[in-house]
Image (cartoon, rainbow, N blue to C red):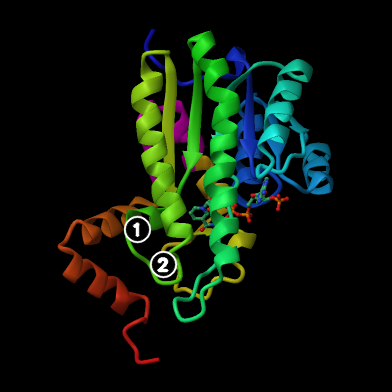
Amino acid sequence: MTPRAMKPADGIAWITGGSSGIGEALARRLAGHGWTVVISARSADKLEAIAKSHTGKGRILAKAVDLVDSEGVQTAVREIEAEYGTIVLAVLNAGIYLPINAEKPSFDDYRKTFDVNLSGTAACLCALTPRMSERRSGQIAIVSSATSFGGMPTSSAYGASKAALVNMAACLRIELHRFGVLCQVITPGFVETPAQDDNAFPKPFMISAAEAAKRIAVGLKSKRFEITFPRRFTWALKAIYALPYGWSLGLVRKQTGWDKPV
Ligand SMILES: NC(=O)c1ccc[n+]([C@@H]2O[C@H](COP(=O)([O-])OP(=O)(O)OC[C@H]3O[C@@H](n4cnc5c(N)ncnc54)[C@H](OP(=O)(O)O)[C@@H]3O)[C@@H](O)[C@H]2O)c1
């Protein structure tokens, strides 16, 4: 069986990090396409409010879970499937950005970033891939970031976690193919969400969360490995990182203003 993009008639969608930003916008978009979407995050009240406010096609349902609790994730997936239906599409989108400054790094911030972005995603995968492999069908999309492409100042935790997610998705893409399960990675550039509120970086070509959701929804209908946008930004960034390190890191240093003396 060849992996294929899932459709609303196949089962339900699960989006982690669905209480705000890209996850919320994608839930609304997919529901609008007729999907039953279960959204997860820690904030039960926000999830419920989004679920209640949804009108029109499809359904949005709330299931609160902290992804750092791997047992809790197993339970949540079991309960979602028992209560609402088979998860055929999972968008593992929950993530945090904590800036790390090299001159005063916080080990706690490194750990928190890896716990949520990496271990949290792995916990979801441990609940999903056995089920989907056994069913010989399903689709998993992991939300990474354009920061995964190469070095960025203050991103030694976030960027490392997002680069690891690309590798994780690539490994699973190969393995899951023979079980008929599609695995994709999403590498957005800047998207206007609450996560960007405290980010002092220049944010070229930033798009709205609704626009990001639209592009993700298109990508999910395809079978391509990487869903990346806005391409004028992510492709330019990829081209920069294809240069020898001496050039690419120098360029990024300049573009981000990190070439100025302290
Ligand atoms: N915005 C951008 O420019 C951008 C660019 C590239 C990639 N991304 C990635 O896109 C994804 C969504 O980001 P966003 O910008 O939409 O951020 P956001 O609005 O801050 O959303 C992050 C989501 O993750 C959830 N979350 C955080 N920690 C969690 C935990 N321990 N367990 C469960 N859920 C948790 C949050 O809900 P609770 O706090 O309620 O748990 C929230 O729903 C992230 O992976 C981010 O790295 C964003």
Q: Quadrant of residue 90?
A: top right
Residue for badge 1: 233
The boundaries of the magenta stretch are 215-228
User: Mark 1 falls on what kind of element?
Assistant: helix
Q: Position of residue 116 (x, y in %)?
A: 60, 49
Give the residue at x 54% y 37%: 122
Seen in the image, is 51 located left or right of residue 100? right
- For mark 2, give the secondary structure: loop
Tell me, yes or no, whether the highlighted magenta stretch contains residue 223: yes
Disc 1 marks which amino acid?
Phe
Q: Image check: 153 left or right of 29?
A: left
Q: Amino acid at mark 2?
A: Pro
Looking at the image, is 5 positioned above or below residue 28? above
Which residue ends up furthest to the bottom in the rendered image? 261
- x 46%, y 34%: residue: 218
Whether 252 is among the magenta residues is no
Nearer to us in this view, 229 or 254: 254
Q: Residue furthest left?
A: 244
Q: Position of residue 225 (x, y in %)?
A: 36, 33
User: Where does residue 44 sit, x and y in percent of width and height?
Assistant: 81, 44
Q: Is residue 99 visible to us here?
A: yes
Mark 1–mark 2 contact, CB under 8 Å? yes
Q: Which residue is mark 2?
A: 204
